[in-house]
Image: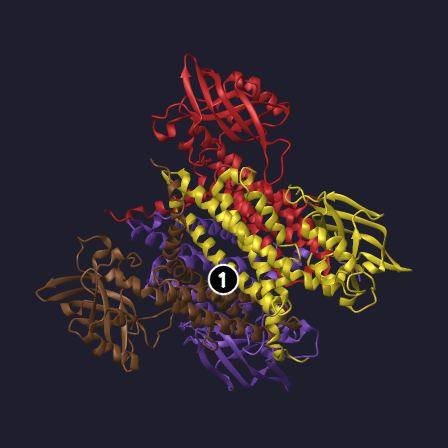
Chain colours: A yellow, B red, C brown, D purple
Amino acid sequence: MEVFTLFGTDEHKEKYLKPLLDGTIRSAFAMTEPDVASSDATNIEMSMVRDGDDYVLNGRKWFASNAMHKNCRVLIVMGKTDPAAAPHRQQSMMVVPIDAPGVTVVRNLPVFGYHDREGHAEILFEDVRVPSKDVLKGEGEGFAISQARLGPGRIHHCMRAIGVSERALELLCRRAQSRVTFGKPVADNANIQDWIAEARIEIEMIRLLTLKTAYLMDTVGNKEARTEIAAIKVAGPNIALKIVDRAIQVHGGGGVTDDFPLAMAYAHLRTLRLADGPDEVHKRAIAKQELRKYRDLRPTS
Amino acid sequence: MEVFTLFGTDEHKEKYLKPLLDGTIRSAFAMTEPDVASSDATNIEMSMVRDGDDYVLNGRKWFASNAMHKNCRVLIVMGKTDPAAAPHRQQSMMVVPIDAPGVTVVRNLPVFGYHDREGHAEILFEDVRVPSKDVLKGEGEGFAISQARLGPGRIHHCMRAIGVSERALELLCRRAQSRVTFGKPVADNANIQDWIAEARIEIEMIRLLTLKTAYLMDTVGNKEARTEIAAIKVAGPNIALKIVDRAIQVHGGGGVTDDFPLAMAYAHLRTLRLADGPDEVHKRAIAKQELRKYRDLRPTS
Amino acid sequence: MEVFTLFGTDEHKEKYLKPLLDGTIRSAFAMTEPDVASSDATNIEMSMVRDGDDYVLNGRKWFASNAMHKNCRVLIVMGKTDPAAAPHRQQSMMVVPIDAPGVTVVRNLPVFGYHDREGHAEILFEDVRVPSKDVLKGEGEGFAISQARLGPGRIHHCMRAIGVSERALELLCRRAQSRVTFGKPVADNANIQDWIAEARIEIEMIRLLTLKTAYLMDTVGNKEARTEIAAIKVAGPNIALKIVDRAIQVHGGGGVTDDFPLAMAYAHLRTLRLADGPDEVHKRAIAKQELRKYRDLRPTS
Amino acid sequence: MEVFTLFGTDEHKEKYLKPLLDGTIRSAFAMTEPDVASSDATNIEMSMVRDGDDYVLNGRKWFASNAMHKNCRVLIVMGKTDPAAAPHRQQSMMVVPIDAPGVTVVRNLPVFGYHDREGHAEILFEDVRVPSKDVLKGEGEGFAISQARLGPGRIHHCMRAIGVSERALELLCRRAQSRVTFGKPVADNANIQDWIAEARIEIEMIRLLTLKTAYLMDTVGNKEARTEIAAIKVAGPNIALKIVDRAIQVHGGGGVTDDFPLAMAYAHLRTLRLADGPDEVHKRAIAKQELRKYRDLRPTS
């Protein structure tokens, strides 16, 4: 929805944005590819070849979230229009109806054995024709759009991770208070108390950093807030995973089953450490920003 | 099988042990209960009430591995025969055919989102009658049998965890060598190299400790080797989980799907941190053994 | 100074608070004892026995910071006036001139080999007479005063830890940019970049939590902010220690010497994990607060 | 001593090796330099310029252990004889009497706040003349000698780290059994028990890997055992540091003073993570060895 708002034509807004806002249809974002490390956008291989007034798309995408939803109508697809251009001008983004000829939704990808109802889809594109009016913002603008989009996506991930953390901590505490081992409630053990305290400390810290990041996005913009966005994208899921894992441990065998929401929460949070770029790519970006202050110290050889 | 060999009657050996060894039937162990922290054996609630020459069993068990297998014929069930006895004399173990009246296999428990073919079953026992000849070793011997059994079970867990670790490290290295990001193979990044080195170091260490433990079990016996058994039960799955998690990270989105064996391996290894007692119970046992050397230092108040 | 402001008599304020604020004298706080775990205030053994209009003090204190300073004139001493009272009414705090008969400054305690100029003193009290007018707030108020005092002390610790963290991160980056190994600056290695990113993330998080804590202390008071105070007391030094340790690693052998401020910073930060109570006592307090919400779930046995 | 045994001339053996073995003199190894990252041997800057039958040495070394000892008589010095040679043929090692003209022992380097009696010396070499007969093994052999020497040195480091670990665990247990907080011995807290168990597990693992490494060094040689040597060089000090740090925590304020051997042990163990190359260099070597198995998977670009 953010992309249509920012970069869509009037036709796009009428046809897709309105029903999206009304909740009557869904859209999916097709960026990641199974065959290359997609965290480096220059690796994208989906080809988009100009042919008259159309582009012809060929390639394979996966982790297109929501694409399995029965109301999903439209895809936003990232691909390569000009392999000879500068690295961040090679990509374009196009609007493709999910029922366009040549689009095949291959399968719903499982995440730790779970198949989401909305799904992470693998989608095959074979000679899919897209009219040039459906190129978002213009040819070569794909990378720029993806950057504009990722800030909001990432803070949503982090806010959800904080919510899951709170819920997992509550479940942990409830279980620890109510179960007895070796003559006393599990909650009376100092190692469990350490886990609870560490969870509370880390939740408070990541919540404040997320609030600050949201404030920066609203005031100075996504670009200026990119270090903070990267920071919460890394810290949020990792903090949540640690808490959920400990909550599983306190729940014993039940923790890994579906009698509690913990195993499924773990699976989804684990996926967040990879979605929109793995931790390592975000840490690299933060470090580069930090190191820039001292670049004059680099030896000139 | 170990339990039938050590404590079975001739009838048990003929009826169950032989076909088990031939691989024509399967057995399952029903110990853990959903309603109590079963790592403390005195918590076991399954009631086994004497009635004439029979015992009448009522209760609910789960994580009975193999019980969903189509050839599973017999259960070994742990329950409480005498709540008034000394803590470790309250329990008994009985042999129960899986088709005995009153036995209901309720469901196959998922682990994360995975349902094993052999399954972790939840089983309900309602007024199940067991003749006294099928009490293993004698009334009140349940805890002792469980102790005798757990050593071999635990070292098997650890050996499997080492195998999974080696496989995950190989997959990690293969992926890191073959994928390129930001202009070079992933394997050329120093953080990935740190992961590989730490994996190799920890695999070598846990393998040697497992070999030593096996040697001790063979030479001085499970009881004398109990600290080492507890040590590898804790260290093996934790080392393997760290390696599998990092292999997932190197595989990107694919790592959490079933295109690679990593997510399923993670789910099973995570369960091992709870099976046969959570880490915390084993650490407690190791620490108590260590602290015993200095018990004369405890203040007498 | 906070204690004199809140609980001192007019005489105390004239004699000690004014020159303290002018910077012409120093004071020291004598609470911790070498022979007991002083994080549990009920363990305090220093005896304060009423004798006519005086109290007679006997005992040994250590980690009395500033007491070695040449201008140190006065001690605030915590001791036990009534061993028979309720646990938190047994203690009293008294004002004792450092040159009072019976007070001996035994030695300057080293911290990882370092002897501070201001010093952590060990002080012996032998039949030291203190007039009852120098009991702060009243007999039995020692624990209450110590609680009132600790909030400000702890946030100061944390603020200093944040400052040290920033300085260590800067030194780490400078060194990593300027030193070359295996053909490239150390800063170009992805493991070092991970360290830098993790440092930046954690500094941002602890800074915000410290600012929030300061705000709470100013608005709702130390008592209401006690969970946050405990949280930053734990998180601040631990985050700083990790960063300083990594900065040492990047500095090679020089990092452990006094050519850089890192080893000394490490020594002092490590001490902070024990000063005013070890991490474990603060985590216990945080956990108890969290668990209180679910106390009705505890089994009634 | 190993170097003299392997590479010394008869004169060296008579003059230095015999009194070294008798314990009447000491030697020191001068390899690390303050101005470059010496873990990369090609960085070495100490110049060794041929002049007639002599070499003239200029440069600065530090962390020359034992050089402050009153009986230290001789230095083995690594320097660069031919900057134009292949990277690992540029260096040579020479035998230099500590009282040779131009050798100045500048200072005893502190480690954290500790100054060892034997000392880590900083040594200045100004136009020090060394006759060519005192070049060990031959010009350009410095790197090869350093490789031959480092195996034994590293396993000694690790064996000492294991000894310190055992001692620290004993001190931790003794303190935890004898001190009381909140109404029970510290040893009765589950978090402290976790620390004890983790220490015991890790000590057992590193001991076995060290024994295996020693066996390999004796049977297949240092070169074949280089991965294991690197593994214990990394794991030994890190395991020991974690245990010593936790022992300090259990000792409270006393732990950072010299009333217990823990703070000094920490300082020395911390230095071991840098001596003979930082952890990161050893991990890099282990990873490269592991990745070599899969090198055919690297993309050919």
Chain letter for mark 1, please.
Answer: D
The answer to whether residue B148 is left or right of residue A278 is: left
Quarter residue A40 falls in: bottom right
- Residue C15: % across, % down: 21, 78
- Which quadrant is the C terminus of chain D positioned in? bottom right
Three-letter amino acid code at the position of disc 1: His
- What residue is shown at x 48% (from left), y 23% (from top)? B7
Q: Residue lying farthest top?
A: B52
Q: Note whether A255 is above or below D104 in the view shown.
A: above
The answer to whether any part of residue C113 appears in the image is yes
Q: Note whether D141 is above or below A123 in the view shown.
A: below
Q: Out of C149 and C54, give the one closest to the viewer.
A: C149
The answer to whether residue B297 is left or right of residue C85 is: right
Secondary structure of the residue carrying numbered label 1: helix
The answer to whether any part of residue C190 appears in the image is no
- Residue D257: % across, % down: 34, 66
Circle 1 residue = D157
Q: Residue lying farthest right?
A: A52
Q: Residue lying farthest left?
A: C52
The answer to whether residue A237 is left or right of residue B58 is: right
The answer to whether residue D190 is left or right of residue D139 is: left
- Residue A83: % across, % down: 82, 64
Q: Out of A45 and B226, give the one closest to the viewer.
A: A45
- What residue is shown at x 59% (from left), y 36% (from top)? B110
**Crowd class of label 1 (few under 14; some 14 to 19; many from 20; radius 10 Å):** some
- Residue A204: % across, % down: 48, 58
Q: Out of C70 and A119, give the one closest to the viewer.
A: A119
- What residue is shown at x 47% (from left), y 81% (from top)? D105
